[in-house]
Amino acid sequence: CVCVCVVISIMLACMAVEYLQKFYNLPKKPSGRIRRSGPSFTSKVKDMQSFFGLNATGVLDSETLEVMRSPRCGVPDVEEYSNAQGTRWNKNIITYRYLLYTRDLPRSTVDFLLETAFRVWARASSLTFVRMHSHNADIMVEFVTSDHGDLYPFDGPRGTLAHAFGPGLGVGGDTHFDDDERWTTGKTGFNLHVVAAHEFGHALGLKHSRNPESLMYPTYKSSRGASLLASEDVANINTLYSKLL
C-alpha cells in the first residue's frame, strides 16, 4: 500500500511538472531531468493557483490537481506563445482556410461549426471573415494528432484539446485541433463550436482570461450562453482592434 501511494504521488508530481512546463514556463534542469521540488516549482504552482483563483499555497492539493487534469487549450496562461500574444492583424478583413478535417463529423458540419465560431467574433467587433479555398490565408485550420510540425505536439485524448498562434507571419493565426479528441456538436465529447470560438480568439490576438465566465478562460466548458462571449471578451476584442475603425 505504501509503495502504491508513493507511485501515485510520483505520477501526480510528474503530471504537475509537465503541466507547469507547458503553461507556466517551469524550466527544466540543464540535465533535462524533471524537477519536482524547489523554489521554482513552488513558485510556478503558486502562479497557476493564483491564475485560477485557488488558494496560492504552492502545494499540490486536490483542487489544484483537479484543474491540472481538466481538458484545456494548449496556449500557455502567462507566457508568449511563439508569435507575440496581444498583437493583432493590421486589417479588419481576416481570411481563413480549412486544410485537414476531423474524422468525427461530416465536412459540411465542420464547415458550419467553424464558420459560426468566426461569426461569434464578427458580431462582437468590426471584423469580417472571408473563406479562402486556395493559397495561404491568415488563419489556416487543421485537425492533426501528436507531433504535427509546430513544436507543440498534442497529447492524445483529453488534456490539450487545441491551440492557436497569435497574429503574425508564418504560423501566425494558424489553429490546430487534436483529432485524437471526440469532436461533437453537443455536450458529449468536445463541442467543436465552443473550442473553435476560443481558439479563434487567440488567432485574433487575445490572451487567456482569469474570468471563468470568459470564453477565453483556459479550461473547457461545454455549457455556455448562446452568444458564448462574456462582456469582457467583447470589450477586449474591440479594444484590440479599435484603432482600425
Image (cartoon, rainbow, N blue to C red):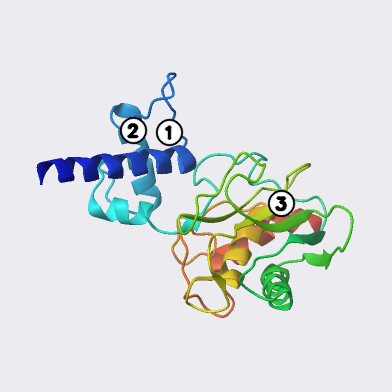
- State the image coordinates of residue 18 (x, y, percent, origin top left): 41, 40
Callout 1, which amino acid? Leu
* Residue 36 in picture, x, y percent from top left: 31, 32
Q: Residue at x 58, y 39 (%)?
A: 80
User: Can residue 126 be seen in this snapshot?
Assistant: yes
Q: Secondary structure at mark 2?
A: helix
Q: Earlier in the sequence, mark 1 or mark 2?
A: 1
Q: What amino acid type should be assigned to the residue bearing mark 2?
A: Phe
Q: Which residue is mark 3?
A: 174
From mark 1 to mark 2, how far is it between C-alphas? 7 Å
Residue 26's mark?
1
Q: Secondary structure at mark 3?
A: loop
Q: Which of the two residues, 192 or 102, is positioned nearer the viewer here?
A: 102
Find residue 122 and report its image quarter: bottom right
Between residues 26 and 239, which one lies in front from this camera angle?
A: 26
Question: Marks 2 and 3, Cα distance to the nearest angstrom?
Answer: 31 Å
In the picture of the structure, the residue carrying the numbered disc 2 is 41
Asked if the residue at tag 1 contacts the one at tag 3, i.e. Cβ–Cβ closer than 8 Å, the answer is no
Q: Are marks 1 and 2 in contact (CB under 8 Å)?
A: yes
Point 66% across, 51% down: residue: 205
Circle nearer the N terminus (2, 3): 2
